[in-house]
Image: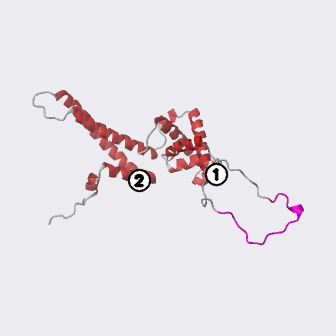
């Protein structure tokens, strides 16, 4: 009896049938959820691509030596170079995605000295301040508490100081909004716990309060915040684009 469906029968056939675009979409969703299974799949696929790139590199060397000889029917060097460059581009995209799973690298630690980290912390503080002072618009803020008791009549001697204070809300400038637009994409490349530690500390909150919000010790909160700042310095300097 012949099959009427083109659906794959096994996981291996399913993996073979998936295109690069579908794989990348699944992995990007897994990175957002911080799924450890996604990390293992991406590492295995990078190893497979590394093997294919090495094989193409060897074929390219052989083709460059044999090209032009009588009876040569192999692939051209240019086409092999294009295939190898495409595979190396995929490897670069996956390695950028893997940054969300691994702790801050030694390269990032060496690159992010104390001066650069202090400047980045100031930028994060300014970004959080800008977010908190943006105009939320009508209906975006919960209404205040109300009381339905009748008004109390006060004498003139008690009336002093009962008027509502007028507070002028300071709005962010255009420069601060532009800087916030540059910082937010970098912040959302960080793992969730590191991003929370970084932004909670920038409010600013004390380390104990940050640890309570994250459900960890204050030492872990400090470590996550430091790793987040180091990654931000590294990402900002290398201008790594989101995929």
The percent coordinates of residue 87 (x first, y second) are 30, 40
Discs 2/1, front: 2
Is 196 drawn above or below residue 89 in the view shown? below
Q: Secondary structure at mark 1?
A: helix
Q: What residue appears at the point 19 percent right and 31 percent down from the top-left corner?
A: 63
Examine the structure image and report whether residue 133 is included in the region drawn in magenta. no
Range of residues picked out in magenta: 143-162
Q: Quadrant of the N terminus?
A: bottom left
Q: What residue appears at the point 41 percent right and 53 percent down from the top-left corner?
A: 29
Q: In the rendered structure, find residue 93 and report the number of the disc placed on it.
A: none
Q: Main secondary structure of the magenta part?
A: loop
Q: Residue under circle 2? A: 29
The percent coordinates of residue 186 (x first, y second) are 50, 43
Query: Image check: 75 left or right of 238?
Result: left
The residues tagged by marks 2 and 1 sit, at their Cα atoms, a distance apart of 31 Å
The percent coordinates of residue 92 (x first, y second) are 37, 40
Residue projecting furthest to the left:
71
């Amino acid at each position: 009896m012949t099959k009427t469906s083109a659906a794959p029968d096994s996981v291996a056939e399913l993996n073979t049938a998936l295109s690069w675009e579908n794989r990348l979409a699944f992995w990007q969703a897994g990175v957002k959820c911080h799924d450890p299974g996604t990390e293992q799949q991406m590492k295995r696929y990078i190893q497979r691509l590394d093997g294919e790139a090495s094989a193409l590199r060897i074929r390219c060397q052989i083709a460059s030596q044999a090209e032009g000889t009588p009876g040569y029917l192999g692939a051209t060097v240019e086409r092999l170079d294009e295939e190898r460059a495409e595979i190396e581009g995929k490897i670069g995209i996956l390695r950028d995605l893997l940054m969300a799973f691994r702790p801050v690298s030694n390269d990032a630690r060496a690159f992010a000295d104390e001066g650069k980290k202090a400047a980045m912390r100031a930028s994060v503080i300014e970004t959080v301040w800008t977010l908190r002072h943006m105009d939320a618009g009508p209906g975006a803020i919960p209404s205040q508490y109300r009381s339905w008791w009748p008004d109390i009549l006060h004498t003139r001697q008690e009336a002093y100081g009962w008027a509502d204070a007028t507070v002028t809300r300071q709005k962010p400038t255009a420069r601060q909004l532009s800087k916030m637009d540059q910082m937010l994409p970098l912040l959302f490349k960080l793992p969730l716990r590191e991003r929370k530690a970084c932004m909670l500390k920038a409010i600013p909150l004390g380390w104990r309060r940050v640890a309570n919000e994250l459900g960890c010790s204050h030492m872990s909160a400090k470590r996550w915040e430091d790793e987040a700042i180091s990654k931000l310095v590294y990402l900002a300097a290398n201008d790594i684009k989101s995929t």
